[in-house]
Image (tube, rainbow, N blue to C red):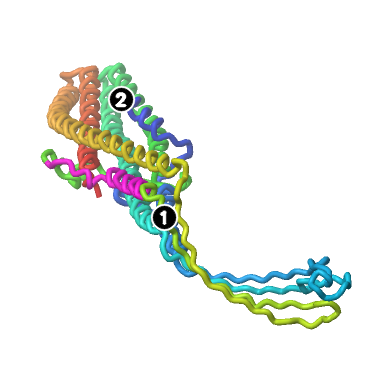
Amino acid sequence: MFRNVSFYLLLAIMLGSQAGFAQSTEGRRLEDCINYALENNPQIRIAQLQVADANWRIKENKGTGLPQISAGVSYQYFIQRPGIPASALGFGTSDEKIAFNAFHSLTPSISLNQLFFSNSYRLATKAADYYRVYVNEQLNVSRRTIRNQVIDAYLPALLITENLVILDKNIANLEKLLAETRAIQQAGFAEQLDVDRLELSLTTLRSERDNLVRQQEMVVNGLKMTMGMPVSESLALSDNLSQLLANYGSADLTSELNPQNRPEYVQLRRGRDLSQIQVDLESKPWMPTVAGFIQYQPGYQGGFGDDTKWFFIPAAVTGISVSMNLWDSGVSKARKQKAMIGIQTIDEQEKLLLNGMQLELANARKQYLNAQERVGNQQKNVALAQRIYDTTQTKYKAGIGSSLELVSAEQSLYAAQQALMSAQYDLLTAKVAVQKALGTAN
């Protein structure tokens, strides 16, 4: 019998989903599911949007150092114009006020500004380029993560699917044996107890099959969620464990770990580069900012006294400005120290990551060796259990064996088959784990 049904239930709970499952007429291989996920999983789309955002950020940063042209217009009407008495200017003793402005002032303007040098602009442009590399690595990390998640969700679903195939085959064999036993019992050469035992065994197998079908629905729905596929769509699996074991070949048990093959390590190093740029910026707060400008104002004024005539009064100006920080009360120093602490933190994280990757590789290789040995042992057990079952069945049909022996042999064969499939599953996951650890998984 299949005694480890709780194992599949645990996998189903971990992968969790609640919607129903409809069998698809077209099965998907593992690579099909991975490719679907890489195109449809929302995490991939978010990472791709971040790459697009980085590209536009680069254009934005570079654009601030290019010529900036602006235009505007302003209008003023003086309700009360400033002025002084005419006598104050030596024009007699009249108290009449001489105004300095017209009632109306219309001032269009157009300006050209150009940044000639800025250390912060230079480093910001450099940081934007690094940031684009950083988000590209982040996209690679997301792709690798989604790929691994699909594999981790696909293999348990495939295991349950293949267990259902074996169950169906065993149920069919037991139904045939039960029919033969009924015929023998009706002829008076077998007891009703023999029929009852086989019926009980068949009922148990059918019940276990129904449980596996429900668990399959949950696990496959979990796979759909990982792929980014709507749960309402149907999904069938077309791979088998033996084919996948052959496709993945033997695990690499000798190659040294190359951290550059792991996207998460490369991403961490890119983050350190960004922190180093911040240190460079705060190390030279005294560097000047140089900018130039040209401005033209074709001004118009009108309404001097009772005269409504307008006058064209243009103005043009150009100039250059230089500014530099002389003292900021320690603000730049504090920012630099914060950036340096960020670098030191990343260095410590790098040590942890490298140590963790080494441990991951070592454990994956040990799991592979253990699983490889288990598969060899279980293959022998299945062959032995099959011989025992065939012999017991022959003896039973010949009337020299009991139904109890037959049911016991049957249970041993089913258990050996399930143990072999579980060992093959462990071997395949161990192969995949070695590839993940080495960073060689496609």
Q: Which region shows up in magenta?
A: 255-280
Q: Where is residue 81 drawn, in percent x and y?
A: 80, 68
* SS state under label 1: helix
Quadrant location, the N terminus: top left
Q: Where is residue 300 drawn, in percent x and y?
A: 71, 78
Based on the picture, tell me whether residue 266 belongs to the magenta stretch.
Answer: yes
Q: Along the horizontal axis of the image, is 116 left or right of 396? A: right
Which numbered disc covers residue 4?
2
What residue does disc 1 label? 120
Disc 1 versus disc 2: distance between alpha carbons? Answer: 63 Å
Residue 27 appears anywhere in the view = no
Query: Tag 1: residue type?
Result: Ser
Image label count: 2
Q: Residue at x 25, y 50 (%)?
A: 442
Query: Tag 2: residue type?
Result: Asn
Q: Residue at x 23, y 39 (%)?
A: 437
